[in-house]
Image (cartoon, rainbow, N blue to C red):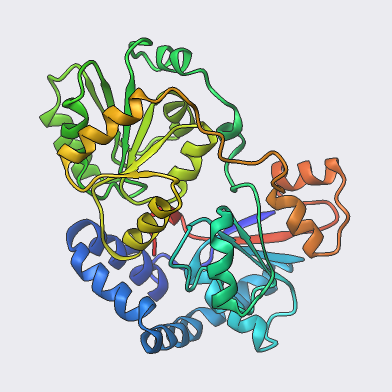
Amino acid sequence: MTVHNGLGASRGPLRVFLERFVRWQLTHCPAAYSFSYAVGVRWKLGRQIALRVLYGVARSGLRSLIDAEQPDVVISTYPGITAPLGVMRQRGQLQIPVCALVTDLASLHFWAHPGADLHLVSYPESLREIAEITNGAPARAARPPLGLTHWAKRERCAARRALGLDPELPLVLVSGGGWGVGDLRGAIEGALDVELLQVIVVCGDNELATRRLSDHYASHSRVRVLGYTHAMADLLGAANVLVHSTGGMTCLEAAAQGCPVIAYGFTHGHVRHNTQAMVRHGLIGHAKNPDQLTRELRQTLDRTQTLAPYADDRACASTAILDLIGHTPASSAIRATERKPRCSSHSCSELGSRHRSSMP
C-alpha cells in the first residue's frame, strides 16, 4: 500500500486553501470558517459550486498520481479528495474502485459521494445520512482505521505510572486536535476545579498555544502541557476522561481505550454539527462553559462502568476493501495489507491529508 497526500504540492491551490487557509480560520477566525462551511457545504447551491471547483482543480493531479501508481483500489480518507474522486468515477474517468473512509459521524457531504464504490463508516449511526446523500450507494460499518497501538488496551494505573504520573489520581486529557484549536485554557481551568485531579493538555502542532500554556502553568504541579505527540494511545489509556474540541479521530481513539469523551471549547462549522449528533446518540458528553465542564467531569468520574463501543463482529476495513476488489482474503493477506508497504498480489493507494481530524 502506498500513501499520498491527495491535495498535491505543498504550494498548490488545494494545499494552500484546504490546509493553510482553513487552519488560519480555525485558529484565528473561527466565525469565518463557520461562514465558509455554511456557504460551501450546508447550502445546496454553494455545495454544487464548491464541488465543481474542487473537481476542476483536483482532477489532473489525481489522474496523474493514480496513473503513476497503477493501484487496484483508491482509498480516500479525506472529504476534499473523496468528492472529486467520486465525480471522476461517475464520469468514467477512473476505472478502478474508490473506497471512502468516513470517520466523522454527521454532516457528511463531501465525505460521501454517489460515485464512490464503497463507504466504510466508523459510526453505524452515519449509515442513514450517507444513504440520503448518495441515493443508496454501498456503505457498511467497519472498525475505525486506527493504528495497531490503539487497539492494545492499557490498565489505567499502570499507564499513568509509565507516564510519570501519580497512578492513584484521576487524569483528564485535554486535546485540541492536530491543530490545537479551541478553548484549551478554559478546559484546563474547568478540570482544575475538580479536586485531586491531574491534567495533561495536548496542543498538537499549535506552537503558540503550547508556549503560552506552558508558561502560564509552569508552576502548577497538576498540569502538564504537550505539543504534538505520538503517544496518544498511552495518554488515552491512562486518562479517565478526554476533553476534546474538534471531535475527530481522537474520539475514535478514545473509544478504543474505553475512555469517555466530553466535547468542549469549539462550536464552529462542521464541528458543531458533528458534536450535536454525537451527543444526540449518547456517544459523548458536552459542556458549553468551564463551570458546566466541571460538573460534567465530576459526573463522569463518579461512574464506574467502562465503555465498550466496538462490537467484536465489526468487520475490519482491510477485509471490506479486499472484498471490493474481488479478492477472497485469508488472514495472511489481511495482515499484509495492514503491515507491509505494498501487497504482493493487489495494490492500493491511500489519498488523504495529514490533519484529517481538524479538516472540514
Image height of 58 relative to 176, above or below: below
Q: Quadrant of the C terminus?
A: bottom left
Image height of 140 relative to 200, above or below: below
Q: Residue at x 50, y 78 (%)?
A: 58
Q: Residue at x 34, y 30 (%)?
A: 300
- Residue 199 placed where, x, y %? 27, 26
- Residue 284 placed where, x, y %? 40, 44
Which of the two residues, 251 or 329, is positioned nearer the viewer here? 251
Q: Residue at x 44, y 44 (%)?
A: 251
Q: Quadrant of the N terminus?
A: bottom right
Where residue 187 sits, quadrant-wise, is top left
Q: Residue at x 51, y 68 (%)?
A: 111
Residue 131 lies left or right of residue 265; in this view the side is right
Which of the two residues, 207 or 168, is positioned nearer the viewer here? 168
Which of the two residues, 177 or 280, is positioned nearer the viewer here? 280
Where residue 139 sits, quadrant-wise, is bottom right
- Residue 352 placed where, x, y %? 53, 61
Residue 311 lies left or right of residue 232; in this view the side is right
Query: Is there any visible trace of residue 8 in the rendered image?
Result: no
Query: Is there any visible trace of residue 167 in the rendered image?
Result: yes
Residue 141 lies left or right of residue 30; in this view the side is right
- How many badges with numbers are in the image? 0
Image height of 197 relative to 256, above or below: above
- Residue 249 placed where, x, y %? 47, 48
